Image (spheres, coloured by chain):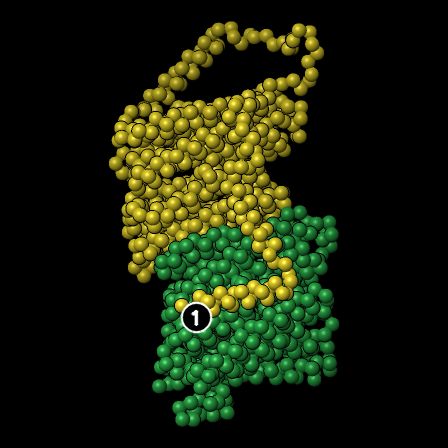
Chain colours: A yellow, B green
Amino acid sequence: MNLLHYLIIIPFIVGLFCLVIPKKLSKLRDLLAIGGGLATFYFTIVIFLRKPVEWFYNDLLLLKVDNLSGFILLAIGLFGVLIVLYSLKFMAGKERLSEYYTYLLWTIGGACGAILANNLILLLVFWGFLGLTLYLLIGIGGPEATPAAKKTFIIVGGSDCLMILGIAIIWSLTGSLQMDNISIHLTGLLPTVAFLALAIASFAKAGAMPMHTWIPDCAEKAPIPVTAFLPASLDKLLGIYLLGRIAMDIFVMNKAMGTLLLIVGAVTIIAAVMMALVQHDLKKLLSYHAVSQVGYMVLGIGTGNPIGIAGGIFHMLNHAIYKSCLFLTGGAVEHRTQTTNLNRLGGLAKLMPITFITCLIAALSISGVPPFNGFVSKWMIYQGVIQLGKDGDKLWIIWLVAAMFGSALTLASFMKLIHSVFLGSPSPTTPRPVAKRNEVSFTMWMPMAILAGLCVIFGVFAYRVPLKNFIFSAVPGISFLGFWSPGLATLLIIIGIILGAIIYWLGNIKSLRTDTTYVGGEIIPQDNRVTGVDFYDTIKDLGPLKVIYKKSEKKLFDIYDQGARVIFLFTKGLKKIHTGLLPTYLIWVLMGTVILFFILVKG
Amino acid sequence: MNLIVLFVAIPLGAAFLMPLLGRVARKIPDILANLANFSLLVLALLATKQGLVVYKIGGWEAVGGIPIGIYLVLDGLAVLMLLIVNVIGFLATFYSVAYMERYTDKPRYYTLFLLMIAGMNGVILSGDMFNIFVFMEIAAIASYALVAFGTEAEELEAAFKYQVLGTVASCFILFGIAIAYSLTGTLNMADMSRVIAQQGIGTPVFFVGTLFLVGFGLKAAIMPFHAWLPDAHPSAPAPISAMLSGVLIKAIGVYALCRVLFNVLGLGKVSSFLYILLVLGTLSMIAGSLLALGQRDFKRLLAYSSISQIGYIILAFGLGTPLGFLGGLFHLLNHATFKSLLFLNSGAVVYSTGNRDLKKMGGLSQRMPVTGTTSMIASMSISGIPPLSGFWSKLIIIIAAIQAQQFIFALLAVVVSIITLAYYLKVQKLAFFGKLGEAWQEIKEVPAVMCISMIILAVLCVGLGILLIPGIKAVILDPAVEVLYNGARYAQLILGS
């Protein structure tokens, strides 16, 4: 048995055991799940260190690990363990837990398989299977989650069907299904259709526009660890991995397709972050950012130059880290307070300090604030766009402005989030107020802390740790335009903070005076707080934006609802002519017969 | 005496004994029917090892080079079809043991059921045109009666429509057989094929071909000849719905059509016929899926879905390539398993809740885990989700369409696949997930025999993909593909010259 098989077989077998273990032995099942996760993680490390590893079946290279897939496997293994660990406490006492762990482990196995596959059909099998496990996992969220699960699976599963089309065209063009020896020039209609089919599949998985609409619905209803694991991290890894593969290996990109990716990227960044600004729910807000950040990755890959692609892929990794961290902190908040409505939260910083700090780090990271990891990858993407301009693209400034503006808006919306949840004063409407300091349990804060730690390490030691080991080997030929020295910058920032602290202590700032609010003698109601929820509501009323927000509330931009509307028009028409009357049906038969005779016998 | 006669003799014999012995003791009808169908199942499995068998009933040899006796022919395609008919047949009978307790007259039910099986096996094995017609009528008339078995107004109306349109179909077919006989002077299919090949394919053959296309097209419910199906299939008792949708439309519709067009008339390489099959298949595929999407009635949704899936099969055959035939035949096999399973699931739901309206269900998985899980597997399989069986056949069909340069048809097949996923997810959402309705708090899972049938079919839905592994493919699927693709060789093989 090849080493690579363990990655697929272990999660599947352990998952099956989880399914059949009787309900009474829930402790054993939990242990088994975490053991399965750890074992898989262990093998991803072993494989990463030994890469390249390959497995042939009858001279057919079916599974392989190269520089690009190696570190993605590592990330899948790590996230798998962390999510299982987090779920032990978070999901405890919920229904259908055996199924939950089974699907979680199968997802890990399926994702490893999809990343390992070198054969397109094999990729398709694992890819489609992941859609199924995602559907089942969202379904664990209970009866309310069913519509979201259905919508998700129709978008994701539907794009998998398109993938079949793309793969079939590739096969008819090249006669090969092996990803390592296909290289198609994008000239003519067929290769373009094949590229678009595969790109749409990757967009749907990663959540780029216009295939993103399942993510907010899914985040709202699915259990938080599922959101943190799939839409936030694993599906990004997979979607962008596929996009990278098709853009770098399978197809030789041309300018038109590159520009298409740039447009998709830029629109995704801006539109999704605008939606995020006006959200009132923690999970929904995060989910729109999960869409917005995909824009950066697509933009990076769309630049087509090594630094941009490397930036896009690095951003994918970083995003997986900070976004799952953010969702997990959101889960911690929900676990304690029973709500994720920003209106009903507040003042949790002192009560849940670890959650607060990890959330803050991840929030700064996603906003691209140095020295955290999100900044480094965004910086690389900016450089890719600038390089694009140097190579003669006239529109580069648009992409750059979109990326930077998006980053600013991201920061703005996270200020709203941090303020509403952790700062400010506690809300009187919290369903279960946290009275005294009450951090979540060890198994829950541990994954959050590890992820936040990674945010710091990947940012401060960007060159020494992630870029050198993971990214540079995956994307050859990178040259930096401007140099950013994270070590030095961090040092400067730390010095700045220390200086600030010294001033804080030396000066007499501590002896400030607090008093009740006084507004011209009015009696102030009890719940008069600055919640932060309405921070950016004014943009909703700004001229053209007002119309767009209104339309998007009516789901005008949702490909799922619009598609359904068109399809149902046809259905209605067809239903109308099926009257159930025998003479009508006999006439159809007669007409059909006449037409067939006319075509077949006359010709 | 050759074994293949038993495929017709056993069910006919059992159908004859059923009314005689059925009233003697309560358990006898169940035992007799299951015994008969189980032995057929075993025979069908044995038949896979037989290779080509030509059996002349009564030992009548050809006179002056013209075969005059009744021929029974077992070739690769027949083996595949026999497997489908008898596996599903047995599981449906087994399911009936519990399900049909609710109806009053088990002996009559089993009599009709066995006659239908005898008819289908006869059509599949028959080597001459007239016996195809006779056996087809046996199966069809039994099925008219079975659709009306509940004798409620709705069932009688459906059976009436089914019967009228079925009779129209039979007329076309009989007419076609008569003209073919006048053209060739023989009724033996192999001999007819030889004569037509000698005379060359001209307008008269096209005329006959079109008659068969309309006739068998009606039996197979291809658009625009499909209108009887959405009424007839849901009205029958669930195991019969499973047989009708899963097997009957394939045995006396798709199979007979292919056999006659490709093997007898030699139209397998005529582009106009192939193109018409492509277009009709695509029409059925699209219209069936759109209509299924708009249904609230569980069984009617499944019936429209059958039209859509038969469309896939016809489309694949219309490509005329070996890969197309492989995809079509494999999809035929898969559709038999998952559609029968879905109808059995719908039967289980009706058994427990007495309700077919999806909007009134909800959360049934909580009370009926076996039905819920198996229906989930079948739904995913029919929607083409890997690694279930339906994924593989759809994959092959789409790849075959691209390979044959029929890009638009490939794209339409993909789009319909998405719609299929949508309406099966709707079934799952409305019936099995969601909130458990007030009225269904007390319902229970169906009896064990029904569960066993459903579980076996679900296992088949998961595992049938293994038929594509080269070693196994060479035994079951490849011989069947060979029969259709090299349609002209049929005469040579049978007549042995």
- Residue B295: quadrant of the picture: bottom right
Q: Quadrant where the C terminus of chain A lies?
A: bottom left
Q: Quadrant where the N terminus of chain A lies?
A: bottom left
Q: Residue shown at 66%/73% (left/top)?
A: B145
Picture layout, residue A441 above or below residue B255 = above
Instruction: Give A458 or B148, whichever is nearer the viewer.
Output: B148
User: At numbered mark 1, what does the secondary structure look like: helix, strand or loop?
Assistant: loop
Q: Which residue is mark 1?
A: A601
Picture layout, residue B136 above or below residue A386 = below
A33 to the left or right of A305:
right
Instruction: Give A44 or B461, whichever is nearer the viewer.
Output: B461
Q: Where in the figure is residue A457, as x and y percent of width and height? A: 39, 30
> How many numbered marks are there?
1
Q: Residue shown at 45%/38% (left/top)?
A: A209
Q: Residue shown at 67%/23% (left/top)?
A: A428
Amino acid type, residue under disc 1 in the picture:
Val
Whether residue A422 is visible here, answered yes or no, is: no
| Label 1 CA crowd tier, 10 Å (few <14, some 14–19, many 20+) | some
Q: Chain of mark 1?
A: A
Q: Where in the figure is residue B395, as x and y percent of width and height? A: 43, 58
A312 to the left or right of A519:
left
Q: Residue shown at 51%/56% (left/top)?
A: B286
Picture layout, residue B472 above or below residue A97 = below
Q: Where in the figure is residue B454, as x and y percent of width and height? A: 59, 64
Q: Where in the figure is residue A94, as x and y percent of width and height? A: 62, 43
Picture layout, residue B263 above or below residue A358 = below
B64 to the left or right of A481:
right
Whether residue A534 is visible here, answered yes or no, is: yes
